[in-house]
Amino acid sequence: MSCVKTLWQLLILTLLLVGLSACDIKDDLLPSDDDERGTVESGSIGNMPGQIAADFTLKNIFNNDFVLSDHLAGGSDPADVVVLYFTMWCPICTSHTDHIYTNIIPQFSSRGTVVYALIDYVSGSVSATYNIAQANGYLTPKFDILADVDQAIYNQFNGAMGITIVIDSDGTILMNEDFRSGETLVEILDQQLPL
Amino acid sequence: MKYNKKMFINHLRAALASGTTLCLIPVVFMGMSSSAHAASCCGGGSASSLVLPKFAEGMIDISMDYEHYTGIWDNDGDWNSEPNDLNQYRINLGYAHRLAPNWQASVTLPYVFNRNKYPTLERNTSGMGDGTISVWYEAFEKITCVWDVKKWEDLMPAVYLGGTLTVPTGISPYDDVADNFDITGRGAYRLDASMLIDKTIYPWNMSFGASYGKYLERPINQEYGTNVEPYRKQLGDRFNTNLSFGYTYFTDEMDSITGTLAYAILKEDEAIIDGTVDTTSGFRKETISATLAWASENRDWVYKLTFNHSPTSDDWGENFATTNVITVGVSHVLR
């Protein structure tokens, strides 16, 4: 009985400590599968799926401008789909990057034009982004690496490590969520670029 | 006065007769979960499991970690250096309690401070890390530390079998957080089965530990504070093993100073998301560490200093961060 009592004391102690920050952590202690997404006004400017992405311009590592609208319908270099990936060069970021570039994009290369760009939101300058891209062996791949020097695009899309944005040729956001396994990205590209 | 073998044996006999012990090697189960996945970008802040010395009634453990990020291993095991100043500090609180002659339980809880500095971005965040609740069974009846091996029984090691529940008290990407800089935990419950085998033939010590952990699947309906279509995720199974060798020096005052070198491997399998294997996840990490522990004459107070190092070269890990961790701590044993 004393053992049980002690276990209860240990449990209570733990629960007290947990309770100190319960507001911050209840989502993990008692995770929910409720769909709490709100509705968005279709066609409005914003960062949620169904909304229109505001135009932006970023420098790539070669100091050239990457303008979103250039890659939308009517732009100078239109694509069917634009895929943006927020990286802070962490292990999982490079793992995702490699997977997108070597496994996902090639599946759709014959089905349409996919513009794929990494957005570096931590390095703070084009030269620093260039250096870390070089260190990771990303100077030669055929995708853009963009320097979000003042985190403007990071804030625009409510970005974070691994957040992946998919935008169609009309500028409509189709995806704004963690890359996860890449399955959602493949599904969306399948829908946008049918066989 | 020189502390010699005869005095040690006499002291050991007296200690055994009074129900106390000199054998205080496995104070903290190093490497089993400590700092195993600490990173503001990866989640972390898991505390160490505590293991109580035989015959002790309880133990309070307080330690502080300073973890500095030196780079990453990519999927191919190639190492790249970290150009930014990324650090994590942790304060770990732990308490272990004897439940019965061969049973003990413990709780640990870390508080985590993330200190990340980029050229134009500096983020300082803090919060609780993931806590643990452990139960250990001691599969031995007597102190197994010996000075001489005179019979086969003297080679008998101390064997501990344990179970640990990691509780997601930390802040994960699936909490209502602003971004990845706030992260202090992994966001999922995990059950570990552990084994620790420890043998001391004074002044030498060797221990081997292994654990296998399974994360529980959980639903997710938000990422970094943004609501998303609900899905289910189960992090990959985790295997952790470590081997250590130690040497103990006794001072004239019968204080002990123990130096320990350890090698550990941590491996986590790929996660499963809505039934699909996430081939971009999973990791492996090898570390080496050195610990210096000073214990008072009655072994009631133990002061520890540990340096844990991830080799900054290729193939010592995959898909994971490399860090150096300095830990200072003190344990107080309650008789």
Image (cartoon, rainbow, N blue to C red):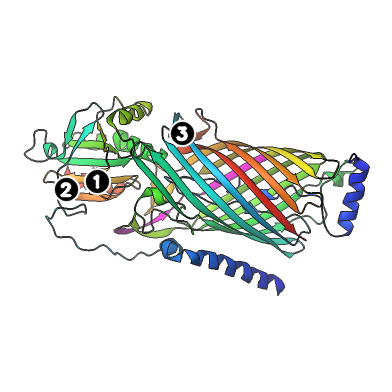
Mark 1 — on which chain does it sit?
A
The magenta stretch spans residue B230 = yes
Type of amino acid at the residue the image marks with label 1: Ile
Q: Position of residue B214 (x, y in %)?
A: 52, 53
Q: CA distance from mark 3 to mark 2?
A: 34 Å
Q: In the rendered structure, which segment of residues is drawn in magenta?
A: B228-243
Q: Nearer the viewer, mark 3 or mark 1?
A: 3
The C terminus of chain A appears in which quarter of the rendering? top left
Could you tell me if the residues under marks 1 and 2 are in contact, i.e. CB atoms within 8 Å?
A: yes
Assess whether mark 1 and mark 3 are in contact (beta carbons under 8 angstroms). no
Q: Nearer the viewer, residue B68 or B173?
A: B68
Read off the chain for label 3: B
Task: Report how many numbered discs are placed on residues in the image.
Answer: 3
Tell me which amino acid carries mark 3: Gly
Q: CA distance from mark 3 to mark 1?
A: 27 Å
Residue named by callout 2: A53
Q: Which mark is residue B71?
A: 3
Residue B302 shown left or right of residue B165 in the figure: right
Residue B74, percent from left and from top: 43, 34
Badge 2: chain ID = A
Q: Quadrant of residue A9?
A: bottom right
Q: Mark 3: few, some, or many residues within 10 Å (few <14, many ≥20)?
A: many
* Relative side of B301 to A20, left or right: right
Residue receiving disc 1:
A165
SS type, badge 1:
strand
Give me the C-alpha separation between circle 1 and circle 2.
Answer: 10 Å
What's under tag 2, amino acid-wise? Ala
Q: Nearer the viewer, mark 1 or mark 2?
A: 2
